[in-house]
Structures are given as structure tokens and as C-alpha cells.
Amino acid sequence: MSLRPILIHPDPRLKKVATPVAEVTDDIRRLADDMLETMYDAPGIGLAAPQVGVMDRVLVMDCVKDPEATPDPMVLINPEIVEVSEAMNVYEEGCLSIPEQYAEVERPAEVSVKWLGLDGKTHSEHFDGLWATCVQHEIDHLNGKLFIDYLKPLKRQMITRKMVKLKRELARA
């Protein structure tokens, strides 16, 4: 396992639709391990492959925030939302590709998702609460969409300008 650099917005790869994974290979398993290590190190609760520059439909997440609780890492390959609740939920979202920027985003409160697991089998689960928000946020990444795309243009532009400045500062360091 190794840490991978996380792309910072604006980066054209973050706006591209990721490619479906044809089969679960050792490379995909290695990618998933690296992504989990990178996510935990960041620290974050979700990470999509495009955020580490890999244009495959793979995401990892673990919404267990309690340090005393057992981690519950999940790897979803080719995830697909199959059902959404009518009830909505507002959550203050952040993103590892948009560091230290947060905004309230409204999404369905519950979703049912199906995906391919590392075992090569189809899995499905019903998510609610933070897990529902996280899985939708990460699937958005696979579709080239960022949480700031839900914001009003002025707020989105302000955050983008901050990220451009941050990238300049990081390049100089």
C-alpha cells in the first residue's frame, strides 16, 4: 500500500466521467488499498479514483468517525444509485480535492446502491445519514461532478479562486 497524491480543484481530470471497470484485477485491488490508505491519512471519509488521477469507477469510503469504533472500510466498483428517497437532507460537505472549504448541499436522505465488490460479485445496500451523503458525493466524482457544482455561481467561483491560489502556493513550496 502507498499514499497517492490527491488532485486539487481545478484539475480537468476531476471534471471527466470515469470509465467502468471491466473486471476486478490485482491492479484494482492495489488501487483500492492505496485509496483507503490515502483517505485515512488525509483524513477523509470518502475518496474516488479520479481524485488520485485514476479514471476508473472506483470509490472507497468509511463513515465511522468514532476513534473507539471499529473502522468499516468499503470499496465500491462501478457503483450505481438504484433508488433515492423523496426525503432530502442537508449536510455541510467538504472534499479532499477542495481542502478546507465547506458548504451545505442538499441530497436525497437515503439511497440504495449496487456495485461490484473486490470479490467480483454484485453487492447492494441501503444507505442513510452520513453514509448516504458520502456515497452520493463520491459517485458524483465518478461522474465528473464536484460538491461545489451544487452551489450558486458566486460561491463556486470564490472557492475556485481560493483553490487556484492554494495550488500556486503549493507549487512554490
Image: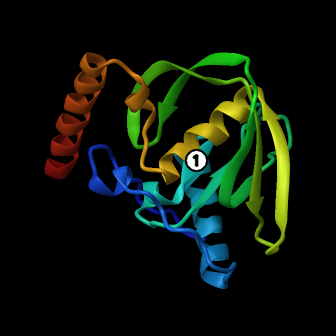
Where's residue 5, x and y in %?
Answer: 41, 59
| Residue type beneath disc 1 | Ile
Asked if residue 92 is positioned above or below residue 71 in the image, the reply reads above
User: Please, which colouring scheme is shown?
Assistant: rainbow
For mark 1, give the secondary structure: helix
Asked if residue 106 is positioned above or below residue 82 in the image, the reply reads above
Say how many tags the image has: 1
Of 100 and 56, the residue lying toward us: 56
Where's residue 37, x and y in %?
Answer: 61, 58
Question: Which residue lies at the image location 19% right of the left edge and 38% below the top edge?
Answer: 164
Question: Which residue lies at the image location 23% right of the left edge and 26% below the top edge?
Answer: 157
Q: Is residue 43 visible?
A: no
Q: Which residue is mark 1?
A: 139
Asked if residue 71 is positioned above or below residue 3 in the image, the reply reads above
Left or right position of 34 against 87: left
Asked if residue 86 is positioned above or below residue 126 in the image, the reply reads above
Of 66 and 137, the residue lying toward us: 137
Furthest toward the bottom, the residue is: 26
Q: Residues within 10 Å of mark 1 (few under 14, many from 20)?
A: many
Quarter location, residue 1:
bottom right
Q: Is residue 4 visible?
A: yes
Question: Which residue lies at the image location 79% right of the left edge and 75% below the top edge?
Answer: 120
Where's residue 132, x and y in %?
Answer: 71, 33
Question: Which residue lies at the image location 49% right of the left edge and 30% below the top edge?
Answer: 94
